[in-house]
């Protein structure tokens, strides 16, 4: 439901509430406690109705500063009431606080509101990279790279060794080919999605709020910041994730030398370990040292994974270090295996 629809619904409820309470006054003794409380409730609801009317007028003018002022006022009122309610769960109270912080940010930075799920270019791209691409990209690129790296094997023998080219140079050439193919697929998909969403629903705004649970070094933040501040860290993590996957699949292919076996082992160790960490608590304690933990770059940079796994050591910095080390180890072992098995 859009903000404007919510405001219209609130106005309808407020009108109905005022009508009902005014009808109830007839049944109360004038000057009595019930009568006084009802009169006060009518007065309070009328003030809320005035805010709803002003909010709807602001929507007609697309006056976002005014919209966010009254929206924040309404959100804070609801938050203050619900937080005092013992029947409201801790998670629900946190959600109310987070929602209030969202509109506090928008009140300070009145950029146009985006519905959920977002559709503008920038926000849709972030949504895609957070919910779908980490799994789908790893799946697709593992399949493509496996095809690339195992195509030179026949009955586990490397037929490319017949060519008068140094084995190390061939390994490096194959590695660079994997980098180019992976980057081409990933960025082509992202650019295509961004362009289509931008043409249909506009580009969006880099100042739109992004929720940060923790800073890049793990300090608790729990505040909204401009999206622009997390774009570079997200891209950095994605680059290192891509390099790790490329080197790991090439290593497995060099050891196994069979198309289907290599694909199965790579998928189990990459996606299997990634998914297992979400449900196996002992793995979550070691998650900061597992390169598969950092496949979802957006959740890493925001600190959401750190909160989800109750592991404060999962940060942007630990992700960069772990992925670099894992990539170097995979690349070094791959070179070694390639020399031994030629």
Image (cartoon, grey):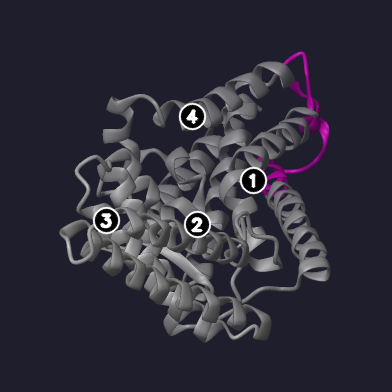
Res. 108 visible in picture: yes
Marks 2, 1: nearer the viewer: 1
Q: Is residue 268 left or right of residue 185?
A: left
Q: Residues within 10 Å of mark 3 (few under 14, many from 20)?
A: some
Which residue is rendered at x = 57% and y = 57% of the image? 239
Q: Mark 2 sits on what residue? A: 237
Choose the circle earlier in sequence order: 1 or 3. 3
Choose the circle earlier in sequence order: 4 or 2. 2
* Quarter of the picture holding the C terminus: top right
**Secondary structure under the numbered disc 2 in the rendered image:** helix
Question: Separation of disc 3 and disc 4 at Cα?
Answer: 62 Å
Answer above or below: position of 167 versus 128.
above
| Residue 160 is a magenta residue | yes
Q: Nearer the viewer, residue 342 or 335?
A: 335
Q: Mark 3 sits on what residue? A: 28
| Residue 52 is a magenta residue | no
Choose the circle earlier in sequence order: 4 or 1. 1
**Which span of residues is magenta-colored?**
152-175
Which residue is rendered at x = 32% and y = 39% of the image? 309
Answer above or below: position of 211 versus 144.
below
Question: Separation of disc 4 and disc 1 at Cα?
Answer: 14 Å
Question: Separation of disc 2 and disc 1 at Cα?
Answer: 14 Å
Q: Which mark is residue 133?
A: 1
Question: Separation of disc 4 and disc 2 at Cα?
Answer: 18 Å
Choose the circle earlier in sequence order: 3 or 2. 3
Q: Which mark is residue 275?
A: 4
* Quarter of the picture holding the N terminus: bottom right
């Amino acid at each position: 439901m859009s903000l404007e629809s919510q405001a219209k619904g609130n106005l309808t409820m407020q009108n109905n509430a005022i009508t009902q309470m005014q009808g109830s006054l007839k049944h109360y003794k004038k000057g009595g406690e019930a009568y006084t409380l009802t009169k006060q409730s009518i007065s309070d609801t009328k003030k809320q109705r005035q805010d709803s009317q002003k909010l709807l007028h602001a929507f007609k003018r697309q006056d976002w500063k005014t919209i966010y002022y009254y929206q924040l006022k309404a959100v804070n009122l609801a938050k203050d009431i619900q937080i005092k309610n013992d029947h409201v769960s801790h998670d629900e109270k946190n959600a109310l606080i987070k929602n209030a912080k969202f509109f506090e940010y928008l009140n300070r930075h009145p950029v146009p509101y985006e519905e959920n799920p977002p559709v503008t270019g920038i926000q849709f791209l972030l949504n895609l990279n957070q919910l779908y691409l980490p799994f789908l990209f790893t799946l697709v690129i593992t399949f493509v790279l496996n095809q690339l790296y195992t195509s030179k094997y026949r009955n586990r023998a490397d037929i490319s060794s017949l060519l008068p080219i140094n084995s190390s140079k061939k390994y490096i050439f194959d590695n660079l080919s994997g980098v180019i193919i992976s980057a081409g697929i990933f960025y082509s998909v992202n650019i295509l999605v961004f362009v289509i969403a931008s043409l249909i629903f506009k580009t969006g705004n880099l100042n739109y709020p992004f929720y940060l649970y923790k800073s890049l070094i793990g300090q608790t933040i729990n505040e909204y910041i401009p999206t622009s501040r997390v774009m570079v860290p997200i891209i950095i993590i994605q680059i290192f994730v891509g390099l790790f996957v490329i080197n790991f699949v090439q290593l497995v292919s060099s050891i196994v030398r069979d198309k289907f076996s290599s694909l199965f082992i790579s998928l189990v160790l990459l996606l299997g370990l990634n998914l297992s960490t979400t449900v196996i608590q002992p793995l979550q304690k070691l998650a900061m040292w597992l390169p598969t933990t950092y496949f979802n770059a957006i959740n890493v940079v925001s600190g959401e994974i750190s909160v989800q796994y109750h592991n404060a050591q999962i940060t942007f910095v630990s992700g960069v270090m772990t992925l670099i080390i894992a990539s170097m180890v995979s690349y070094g072992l791959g070179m070694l295996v390639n020399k031994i098995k030629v």
